[in-house]
Image (tube, rainbow, N blue to C red):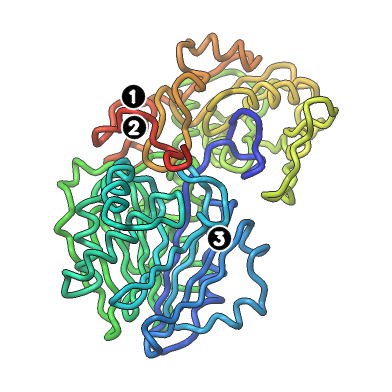
């Protein structure tokens, strides 16, 4: 991924997903914290900024929740000793990258509320577009906020609705009627594990089972990591609840006609792990397809096809398979650059790109290279990668991108910035090609996007400016810090 100055939050990939969620309820009474830890480990690609776990005992006192969360990666925040002390047969976990709300410990999730009906633990992936109005309404009726994230608005509304509802899941449904935008939620009530997905299905959510335990999580790869079987996806607009008797209740009152759904296409292009399936579609197969389409629609004569790791690799393989040009490895990625990476100063000779990525000179020297990446955001990393290939002896560098050009911001949980910061804004493809120093440049055609999701309805707002629901009149991301 190619963002501008590579930041401390995630020092290589430029485009960021908001979060990953993982909830578990062991009906046999076993402790779930260590399994949630491994589930979050499998979802680490969805957020490297902060993480947390909250657990409770369903047969214990209603108000007792054990929580541990902090800034950092999953294996930095949790130790074996920490997990051993977290007793509980129900729990929720979260990994975060902030698109709305500052990068602070206070904004780490899960959020835990103690209120009249007991406790509520919540983990949220997505971004609300009406959080500001909802928050103001709550503040004027006495609510005091501890964070600057929209997820706390959801938690408050669920707690308030619970006072008027027969069940926790009914409270979640009533709260979801008030919130607008993208959300996949996992909610822990004293006796139930609840999952909710927004009516457009922007963010993925699925259900799994291992022995007598149920899991609700962002991606199927997390189920496989812990040895759980996939049960099904949570439908867009559906609210599900795992009850103490082992039943999965379902409320589809918020579901839309399928043609109005709008999954984030970037789950298939970049966000999700390649071994995941989202709504029945293989992420890996989608990326292979994207590469094949690039080879069909933007062919070029060359000696080698390479991917920018990691998300460009599968598309590069697809391009090679379709074109017959050999697939190779041109980049060595330093896997040990963590969240706390200190970016080199302007005055120092170390390039922040080179610290994370080096070129295999033997692979590219004297060759015409096709370089596949999943997107160009601002473009200031792309030019450096192209230059690195040339410095290593590549005679030509042809760049192919497995998504269309970004022309509009995203308000639904992806940190695509304001239009003026996007390299494709007010530039032709030839202009962009010159800026990044490539011999040629080709993007995936918009008409191909539905084929990546096997015909499932998707959101294309960041490419077309046409969003599935009315976007806010101004940029609301990071709103509560202002």
The answer to which of marks 1 and 3 sits earlier in the sequence is: 3
Q: Nearer the viewer, mark 3 or mark 2?
A: 3
In this view, the residue in front, 333 or 381, is 381
Report the disc number at residue 431.
none
What residue lies at 21% left-to-right and 61% top-to-bottom? 173
Tell me if residue 19 can be seen.
yes
Total numbered labels placed on residues in the image: 3
Q: Quadrant of residue 358?
A: top right
Q: In the image, is residue 374 above or below residue 439? A: below
Label 2 belongs to which residue? Answer: 460
Q: Are there few (<14), some (14-19), or many (20+) residues within 10 Å of tag 1?
A: some
The x, y position of residue 59, in whole percent, is 37, 90
Q: Nearer the viewer, mark 1 or mark 3?
A: 3
Q: CA distance from mark 1 to mark 3?
A: 33 Å
**For the residues bearing labels 2 and 1, Cβ distance under 8 angstroms:** yes
In this view, the residue in front, 400 or 407, is 407
The x, y position of residue 375, in whole percent, is 52, 30
Report the disc number at residue 464.
1
Q: In the image, is residue 265 above or below residue 192? A: above
The answer to which of marks 3 and 2 sits earlier in the sequence is: 3
Report the disc number at residue 51.
3
């Amino acid at each position: 991924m190619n963002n501008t100055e590579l930041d401390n939050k995630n020092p290589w990939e430029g485009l960021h997903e908001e979060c990953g969620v993982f909830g578990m309820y062991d009906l046999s009474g076993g402790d779930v914290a260590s399994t949630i830890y491994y589930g979050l480990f499998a979802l680490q690609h969805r957020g490297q900024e902060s993480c947390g776990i909250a657990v409770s005992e369903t047969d214990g006192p209603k108000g007792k929740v054990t929580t541990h969360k902090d800034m950092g990666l999953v294996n930095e925040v949790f130790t074996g000793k920490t997990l051993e002390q977290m007793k509980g047969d129900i729990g929720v976990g979260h990994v975060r990258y902030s698109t709305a709300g500052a990068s602070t410990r206070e904004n780490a999730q899960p959020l835990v509320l103690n209120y009249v009906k007991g406790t509520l633990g919540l983990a949220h992936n997505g971004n609300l577009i009406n959080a500001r109005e909802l928050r103001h309404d709550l503040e004027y009726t006495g609510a005091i906020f501890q964070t600057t994230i929209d997820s706390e608005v959801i938690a408050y509304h669920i707690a308030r609705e619970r006072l008027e509802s027969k069940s926790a899941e009914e409270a979640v449904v009533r709260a979801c009627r008030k919130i607008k935008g993208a959300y996949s939620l996992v909610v822990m009530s004293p006796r139930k594990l609840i999952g909710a997905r927004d009516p457009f299905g922007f963010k993925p959510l699925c259900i799994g089972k291992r022995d007598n335990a149920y899991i609700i999580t962002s991606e199927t790869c997390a189920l496989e990591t812990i040895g759980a079987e996939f049960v099904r996806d949570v439908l867009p607009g559906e609210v599900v609840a795992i009850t103490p008797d082992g039943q999965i209740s379902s409320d589809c009152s918020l579901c839309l006609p399928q043609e109005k759904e709008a999954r984030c296409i970037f789950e298939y292009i970049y966000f999700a792990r390649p071994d995941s399936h989202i709504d029945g579609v293989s992420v890996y197969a989608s990326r292979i397809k994207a590469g094949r389409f690039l080879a069909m629609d933007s062919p070029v004569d060359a000696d080698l096809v390479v991917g920018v790791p990691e998300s460009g690799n599968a598309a590069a393989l697809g391009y090679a398979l379709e074109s017959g040009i050999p697939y190779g490895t041109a980049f060595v990625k330093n896997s040990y650059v963590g969240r706390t990476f200190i970016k080199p100063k302007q005055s120092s000779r170390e390039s922040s790109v080179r610290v994370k990525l080096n070129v295999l000179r033997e692979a590219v020297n004297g060759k015409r290279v096709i370089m596949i990446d999943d997107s160009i955001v601002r473009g200031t990393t792309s030019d450096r990668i192209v230059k690195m290939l040339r410095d290593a002896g590549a005679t030509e560098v042809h760049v192919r991108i497995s998504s269309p050009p970004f022309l509009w911001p995203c308000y639904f949980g992806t940190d695509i910035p304001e239009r003026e910061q996007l390299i494709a804004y007010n530039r032709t493809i030839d202009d962009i090609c010159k800026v990044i120093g490539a011999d040629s440049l080709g993007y995936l055609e918009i008409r191909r996007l539905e084929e990546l999701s096997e015909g499932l309805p998707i959101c294309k707002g960041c490419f077309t400016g046409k969003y599935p629901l009315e976007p806010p009149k101004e940029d609301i991301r990071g709103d509560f810090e202002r």
